Each structure stands twice: as structure tokens, then as C-alpha cells.
Amino acid sequence: MSRTETRNDYKYFMTIPTRWMDNDIYGHVNNVVYYSYVDTVSNAYLIEEGGLDIHGDSVIGIAVESHCNYYTPLAFPESIDAGLRVGHLGRTSARYEIGLFSKSSDTACAAAHFVHVFVDRDTNKPVPIPEKIRICLARILHQHGG
């Protein structure tokens, strides 16, 4: 993902307010907090749109890879628009791509990705992505290069 990521590159959005504790001593959101925004938007989508029951489903997604590029600082008290898309949808895994935007910008302040592998809750072995989740992920699948 490059600095040219814009709001138009994402298919689902969620507004996330920053908190006082998100800022570090330098007066901007600390780098590790960006990952909580990434988790928030992606899991909210799975729960709201895919019907994921985080407490009861036999299949869960576990993070196996993550990365974030930081371009422009964010800071409390602004709210962030977190954009979400799926960059790759495999048989047992999905790559989520997230753009974090300030309210005043159409260009991403940060761009992140992470990969979920779907596993059986009890055995922790990879399993096919459940159909209801696959359908919701396919709705926000990004066609690269097109």
C-alpha cells in the first residue's frame, strides 16, 4: 500500500474516536495504538456483516501477519475514519487492508494490513472460511490493478 491510498480505495468505513490515552509523550497517537484501530474495524465488520460470534463459533480467525505504514500523525481528540477492504481471499485465510484517515483528509494517514487464518477453536488447525464470513469478505474484496 502506498501513500496514494484514498478513501475511494476502501469499501467499508467505521469512525473510531481517539482517546486521551492513545497519545504518547510526543503528542500524537502512539504507533502500537494503530493496531487496535485495525483490529476494531476488521472485527466489527466480521461481527456486524458476517455474523461472527466471537464467543460461540467453532471457527475463529487468528492473526498471523501484520504491517503498518505511518504517513501523517493522528492525535487526540480527533476521530478517525477506518477504511476496510479485503486484499486477498483464500480458502482458509484472508488479508485485510486498512486505511486510517483523519476527518480532514481523503488520503490515508496510515495504511495497514493483517492476515487472519481461520482455525477450529478447539484444535487450532486451519479450516475453510465459514460461508457466511466468506460472503461478507467477498463483498469488500479489492481488485488490484483494476
Image (tube, rainbow, N blue to C red):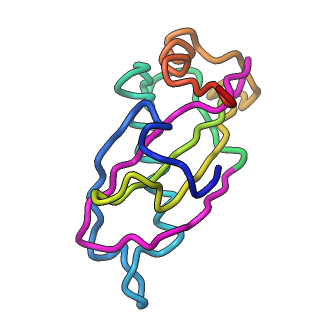
Asked whether 105 or 38 is in front, the reply is 105
Most distant residue in the top direction = 131
> Residue at 72% across / 22% down in the picture?
90
Left or right: residue 103 versus residue 73 is: left
Is residue 77 on the magenta stretch? yes
Q: Is residue 53 above or below residue 38?
A: above
Identified at 46% across, 66% down, the residue is 33
Q: For the stretch drawn in magenta, what is the main secondary structure?
A: strand
Q: Position of residue 46 (x, y in %)?
A: 45, 28
Q: Is residue 118 visible?
A: no
Q: Quadrant of the C terminus?
A: top right
Can you give x and y, in whole percent of width and height, for residue 14 in the image? 32, 42
Residue 119, image x, y percentages: 68, 27
Answer with the quarter of the image where residue 71 lies. bottom right
Q: Is residue 116 left or right of residue 84?
A: right
In the rendered image of this protein, does residue 136 appear above or below residue 62? above
Residues drawn in magenta:
66-93
Is residue 99 shown left or right of residue 60?
A: left
